[in-house]
Amino acid sequence: QKEVEQDPGPLSVPEGAIVSLNCTYSNSAFQYFMWYRQYSRKGPELLMYTYSSGNKEDGRFTAQVDKSSKYISLFIRDSQPSDSATYLCAMIRTSYDKVIFGPGTSLSVIP
Amino acid sequence: DADVTQTPRNRITKTGKRIMLECSQTKGHDRMYWYRQDPGLGLRLIYYSFDVKDINKGEISDGYSVSRQAQAKFSLSLESAIPNQTALYFCATSETGRQETQYFGPGTRLLVL
């Protein structure tokens, strides 16, 4: 079993839709949970991170962590064509540890 | 100018050749990383360096070596390239104690024939 699993997609949605991206993990020691966005032919960039359980909101993006279920989500409201990218979940035990990345979900937002 | 740069951006080489991928950063970070990205496998850590004198193997270091020439420069070498090293390679940096926030370069697309 991989430490971090993520549906690779591709996921295609119409502009304005609410998008839900999800990851599951097996190591209960993870405490920091990140979402990176990667545009085609670019390096990943950090979108947002959450420490421990709970929700965090940043504009149209909401990150949600459920440690009891070992499940994290990223919600995108009012999705835009510019949100078309691959979204990588990532997690880490402490801020000094190595990051474990999920394989990424490819998202296309159709105008 | 980009904070993390990688050269070359694309490279085609033949089996058995030695190649070097270079990474430079202007962020002033101590920590630097080399990852490879393959479809369906995500980013996997090859090597990482906490400072110029501290270099560590990641999960897939076999067939690779690195050199940290300065705080700002971290190079990855494939001593004898093989076709299954065909992948997208990324360099990244982070502040000490802030590894949840990594800054990636644009990547090097490597094809080994």
Image (spheres, coloured by chain):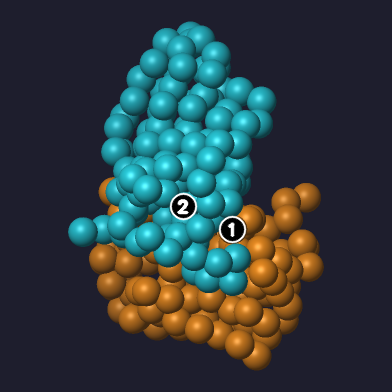
Chain colours: A cyan, B orange
Query: Where on the picture, by quarter, is residue A1?
Result: bottom left
Q: Compared to B80, does A73 lie above or below?
A: above
Image quadrant occupied by the C terminus of chain B = bottom left
Q: Chain of mark 2?
A: A
Q: Is residue A73 visible?
A: yes
Q: Which residue is mark 2?
A: A90
Q: Is residue B36 visible?
A: no
Label 2 sits on a secondary structure element that is strand
Task: Indicate the position of residue B96 as horizontal and vertical percent values.
Answer: 69, 71
**Residue count near mark 1 (Cα–Cα under 10 Å), binned few <14, some 14–19, many ≥20:** many
Label 1 sits on a secondary structure element that is loop
**Residue count near mark 2 (Cα–Cα under 10 Å), binned few <14, some 14–19, many ≥20:** many
Foreground residue among B7 and A54:
A54
Side of A23 relative to B56 (left or right): left
Residue placed at 43% from the left, 36% from the top?
A: A73
| Residue occupying the far front of the picture | A68
Task: Indicate the position of residue A6 as horizontal and vertical percent values.
Answer: 32, 43
Task: Indicate the position of residue B58 as horizontal and vertical percent values.
Answer: 43, 76
Mark number, residue A86: none
Side of B57 relative to B106 (left or right): left
Side of A82 relative to B79 (left or right): right
Residue placed at 56% from the left, 23% from the top?
A: A82
Query: Where on the picture, by quarter, is residue A77?
Result: top right
Q: Which residue is mark 1?
A: B100
